[in-house]
Image (cartoon, grey):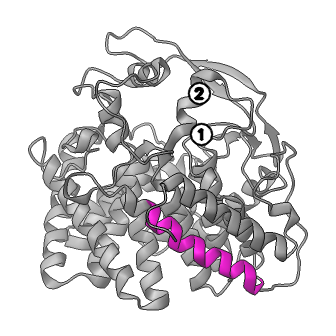
Amino acid sequence: MNQNESFPARLAGQNRRDFIRLSAVGAAGLALSRPLTVSAVDAAAPQPAMHAPPDESAVLAERAKDYLRQIQEVMRGPGGLIISHSRFDTRRPLQEGEELSPYLHQVLDSVWGPEAPKPTVAEWYYGENTAWATGWLLWSQMIRYRVTGEEEAMTIARKCFRDLNHLFALSRPFEPGLLGKPHGGRGGQTTSYDQSANPVLLYAEFARDFGTAEEKGQARRNLLDHGDYYLRRNWVMNHHGNLARIVDPAHTSAMKYLACMHAAFDATGEVRFRDNAVKYVRQIAGAGLLPWPAQNYELNANLMYYSWLGEYWSKTSVADAADWIGNIGVYWEAAQRGLDQEGLLLDGIYDTRNKKFTPTKEGWMETNPPSAGGKPSTLRWWRSPTGYQGRTLYTLTIAILGMLAQKHGRDPHAHEISRKILLRVDGSGLRQCWDDGRLPPEMQPFANLFGAEFPAQWLVAYWMGREQRSW
């Protein structure tokens, strides 16, 4: 590779090489330039188990190296923190003072409340998903090290661990134990459901399995504060400047925060953490919110997230609260019904009772979240089966879900679909929004945003497949 080439040129070259290899093995359905379709398909009929052909394995292995390099290109924040969103074409962060799309401002303004200072658009995208991206990368490199023993994997995993320690330190002036989003590379007060168990469970896992005595001690101190943080706040979280108590009533996604509390017990032995986590997990199960929170459910990253948490809960004192491992199969069956012929997840709703998937009708929708003044504000949001924000993220989490399903005996052929996804999500797909040719002008800025979590998610699925010897 010519190191003097621009990033887009290198990426284009990478994609051309992938296309040639895929064409050579007759993977017509996976051609990187193939138009997207909108036809939903049911799970494929069982086929004899087989490993990926050698040429496909070579494509995946080379892409794994390239995607890791792409993440490393955006490890440019303070202390090497991952910049969560940068311009796709340049990997340059959004800059203060330059003209940014009014729609980007509208998105931020529509969600932000009065309980935390509002970042600028550039600050928001700089660190909104940093903790999440760090967690995915840490996960992938721990698996990689177990599979290969490569020191590079351990070096990167240890860097991710240090970065999370840094985030704890940045947040400490606001509140001990807080793991806030580092907007603009600075400490922040806000959190979210998704950026809780990931990265906290992975942080605890690294300390337990790979940490030095000093690292184990540091993790114990941070997680002791982290558990007390939830108790001190009585489960009131700050989401984009809006305060919300995430228990009472029960909420399925609260398990993501509850797992953090239980991880604090794992690291410290403090039973108050275990008892509080167990209480609310049982509340969720008792309310009938597992495996599904509602009959009609959007297929998204939660299918993987709830499956991964189910694997965790199955090893704790709430193992009897639900069929945690069986539910992985339930989520996997649902996910397959939302995939198009290329293995990409369509935007749509799944009827959990009748097991039917309905793709979203293309068009604008309106939401009315609370604004800082307490008055509803309207945000127009584009929904499309094939061109929508989140398609890469959701699709790659389905690839991870497939490997979880195979790992736990729910589907011995799941790796075939996961492999199809990994081959289809080429470098041009690592964008915050898919552009299927019909993306409205307001949404175009998202098509030029690189999400660092996407290649990291790809790497998790890839190394899970290597661990299971599926490719």
Query: Going by the image, does 239 lie left or right of 233?
Result: right
Give how far across and how far down residue 438 sits, in percent: 74, 29
Give the residue type that dot 1 points to: Cys
Do callouts 1 and 2 mark residues in contact (Cβ within 8 Å)? yes
Near mark 1 (Cα within 10 A), the count class, few <14, some 14-19 or many ≥20, is many
N-term-proximal mark, 1 vs 2: 1
| Outermost residue to the left | 173
Q: Identify the image quadrant of residue 342.
A: bottom right
Most foreground residue, 94 or 258? 94
Relative to 296, say whether 139 is above or below: below
Give the residue type that dot 2 points to: Met
Most foreground residue, 356 or 101? 101
Q: Is residue 319 visible?
A: no
Report which residue position mark 2 lands on. 443
Give the magenta part as a residue range: 53-70
Near mark 2 (Cα within 10 A), the count class, few <14, some 14-19 or many ≥20, is many
Most foreground residue, 99 or 403? 99
Relative to 389, say whether 147 is above or below: below
Q: What is the distance, in whole Å, between disc 1 and disc 2 at their CAs?
A: 8 Å
Report which residue position mark 1 lands on. 433
Give how far across and how far down residue 294 sits, in percent: 65, 40
| Outermost residue to the bottom | 149
Give how far across and how far down residue 172 sits, in percent: 12, 49
Residue at 27% from the left image edge and 70% from the top image edge = 159
Residue at 30% from the left image edge and 79% from the top image edge = 155
Based on the picture, tell me whether residue 56 belongs to the magenta stretch: yes
